[in-house]
Image (tube, rainbow, N blue to C red):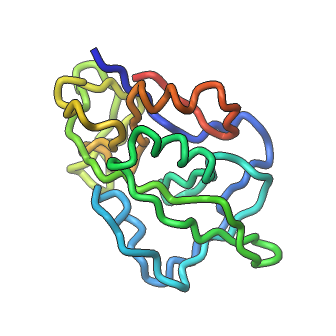
Amino acid sequence: MRQFYSLTYANTEENLLTVERAELVGFDHTLLWEGGTLSAFPKDLALFASGTSTDSVRNQLSWHILSNRATRLITRVAKRDVQLLPAPLFDITTRMPISGYDVVVPLNRIGCLDRSKSAYEVDEFLPNRLVVLSAVIDESRVPHDVEAFCLDESPYGDLFLSQAVVNELTGKRLRGIALIRT
């Protein structure tokens, strides 16, 4: 039986890097929820952040913005399941680029939420989507060669990782990342 974990932001320390303002210049930020590849972000797109270095950047866009260190670990096992785009992060005060971060775009959207065991609500803005409060994955619906995915029922939510990916992340002292067993 395969086990999956939800990768989410962990607010365990104060003042970790957080996106305070996004200048999307007409870019539809929900494209990252669709489960496909993107060529690049528009040149003028900017995410202005403040705080100290972390492995997961908190943001209101429901994007998975992770340190290069974290994405290297994830792609050791799940390279074909995610696309990495350089994160357009800038210091909110100096407006200087903040390097060392990627936006992780899950390439797989899988309808595998076990609704009988999960806690969720219907999204009031997108009635065909769910807000998942506590996920239980029906592992029989996840293809055996998939190591990372988002839920088709709630694509703007968490990134789900296999035990093999979690093994790469465990014990690495990653800051700002929580791995929640489903």
Tell me if 93 is positioned left or right of 81 in this view: right
Pick the residue in front: 24 or 107. Answer: 107
Number of numbered markers: 0
As drawn, the residue found furthest toward the front would be 76
Tell me if 27 is positioned left or right of 2 in this view: right
Tell me if 91 is positioned left or right of 47 in this view: right
The x, y position of residue 70, in whole percent, is 58, 44
x 49%, y 37%: residue: 7
The x, y position of residue 44, in whole percent, is 55, 85
For residue 135, what is the image quadrant?
Answer: top left
As drawn, the residue found furthest toward the top would be 1
x 33%, y 44%: residue: 150
Quadrant into which the N terminus falls: top left
The x, y position of residue 53, in whole percent, is 76, 52
x 43%, y 83%: residue: 26
Q: Is residue 129 above or below residue 99?
A: above
Tell me if 157 is positioned left or right of 69 in this view: left
x 46%, y 45%: residue: 75
For residue 87, what is the image quadrant?
Answer: bottom right
